[in-house]
Image (cartoon, helix red, strand yellow):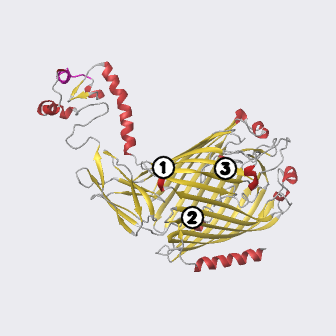
Amino acid sequence: MSQYITRCTLAAVMCAAAAAPVPAQTRARVHPAALASVTAAPQAVVHGIVRDDRGRPLAGAVVTALGATMSVAVSDEEGRFAFQNLPFGPYLVRAHLQGYLPPRARLVQVNRASLTVASIALTRQDGGDNAPSVLEASVGATEGSGSATAEGDGDRHDHGEVAWRLRHLKRSVLRSAAGLVNYAGDSLGGDSLASLGRAVATPARVASILADVPWNGHLDLLTTTSFDRPQDLFSTEAWLPRGVAFLSLEAPTPGGQWDMRGAVTHGDLASWILAGSYRRAPAPHRYEAGFSYGVQQYLRAAPDARAAVSEGGRTVGAFHAHDEWTMTPRLAVGYGAKYARYDYLAERGLFSPRASVRIAPTADEALTIRAAVSRRAIAPGAEEFIPPASGPWLPPERTFSSISPRRGFTPERVDHVELAAERTWAGALVVGVRAFRQRVDEQLVTLFGASSPSGAEVGLGHYYVASAGDVDAHGWGVSVSRTTAERLRASVDYSQVRSTRVGSAPDAASLAVLAPAVLRDDRQRVHDMTASVDTTLPFTSTRVFALYKVNSHFAGVETGEPRFGARFDVQLTQALPFLNGAGGQWEMLVAVRSLFREDLVDASVYDELLVVRPPKRVVGGVTVKF
């Protein structure tokens, strides 16, 4: 088997190196360090200019383009802006500037290497330079322009008796302190008007702030279900589909970007999750900080899950911060940490630090060398609460419990050290190699389809977690990826790992009965190959992402030994241009996935291999981008 996989790997590498250019906009896969830093090849350059309602150029306007990707530009002193490296396709273009009303989004079709869009006109919020300003709850000019408006521009006002009396009311002493309702420059006194002014002032300020923020985002209305066999989809005993609503908001700024995401579902398992972050780039310090909070409430769940949960639910909160400091053009240092609190653990707080160094020995930066060290602490069931790095984001939708109720939940800790090098050839082909070493304490095991210790029937919506003990592992890997101007990216990653079991598994007695293949030999050699393709068809606006993972040591339930197997993740996104309207862009999403965990750089090599009989998850619905 080892020789067979090695030969397949060499053949795939040679084919990728000799292949003709192919399209892709990559959904960056996190596991291969060599693939994480690759960006899409240049596609198109879009130019434009921002003007005011009098045709004068405006500097400092934030212009965004949302489509196959999102790009942000800021207009210069001549009002000009430019988007670099935009893949072909439709984009919603918007402009925002403090003190100006944002125009409606404009749909621009990018279909050639260089494109100039029509100028974008912004209108001042006060209607022009000479118009009376409206402040908070005011109706008219400020104090400085009040006399001129009342006396010199009388033709612009109502000359009725009521209007005359309002203009000649005695000035209120609250005028300078509260900025109350004005009419032609004179204040209306009285406590009732003061209360009215304060009541209207606050929402006016909020509306002004929100109008100046270049909000972008999308709303997903999804339906998800799981099945073990295809015929289960038509069975009344299958896990019933449930609806999910997901909202994502993005607010780009000249120095970075704010992100807010939230999802909610309701049913036998009601849950919601919220996350926010801020990323600053480009800058010598490219940092990111954020948080997430997830809640899982059990209305009707597996008896083992309800028995393990206090007050019928679980909550998880996490904070993270990371900074990449570019000390010189050839040297960058990264450092950061994550803190998560799980209310169902005896040791509720888990801390995960990491650090890295990246060096470019050559002047053209075609060769980069990276060294990284990290300590990752993760709780059983954390995948239900922590937002994924990519793909559809679903709130907690499964219940879980420990296979040994008396022992409870024990977190997994992974100490990871890695050295990697990448070499870019002709700007499109990237070859990477890496070597790593891991020490895993309390390796997690995830069991689907296992019999409940209490004898109760358990469906696909519940799984059990256990510990396989400690593991020492070291290995190496090679990866090849290629991205071309035709918007297709393909990658192949091969790794070989040698592992040694340290001590015995704490849950060995239960695992020997339910999943004996999880109890590994003292020494093992694991082969893994992962291939991915990400492409967008320009004429039909169809995006396809497919990932296929083959490994020699998946844990099964049919035999007591690890077996050769494969798992996959397929996503299809189809634009629906006939539904576009009111500044929104509609898409249809269908995804099928048998992989259970994310393939992270610092994750244990056994995390996915020790997921026994994971069900296939199906997600479908519509996405509205705005």
Q: Nearer the viewer, residue 49 or 98?
A: 49
Position of residue 599 measured from the top left corner of the image (x, y, whole percent): 65, 59
Instruction: In the rendered structure, find residue 588 and report the number of the disc placed on it.
Output: none
Reading the image, the residue beneath label 1 is: 217
Q: CA distance from mark 2 to mark 3?
A: 21 Å
Mark 2: few, some, or many residues within 10 Å (few <14, many ≥20)? some
Q: Secondary structure at mark 2?
A: helix
Q: Position of residue 577 (x, y in %)?
A: 47, 56
| Residue 231 placement, left or right of 514 | left
User: What segment carries the magenta color?
Assistant: 162-173
Mark number displayed over residue 383: 3
Q: Residues within 10 Å of mark 1 (few under 14, many from 20)?
A: some
Tag 2: amino acid = Ala
- x then y, percent, for residue 171: 21, 22
Q: Residue 261, relative to residue 489: is it above or below?
A: above
* Disc 2/disc 1 C-alpha distance (Å): 24 Å
Q: Which residue is under mark 2?
A: 36
Q: Type of residue at label 1?
A: Gly
Which SS class for mark 1?
strand
Q: Nearer the viewer, residue 514 or 283?
A: 514
**In the rendering, at what x and y percent does residue 261 appear?**
54, 46
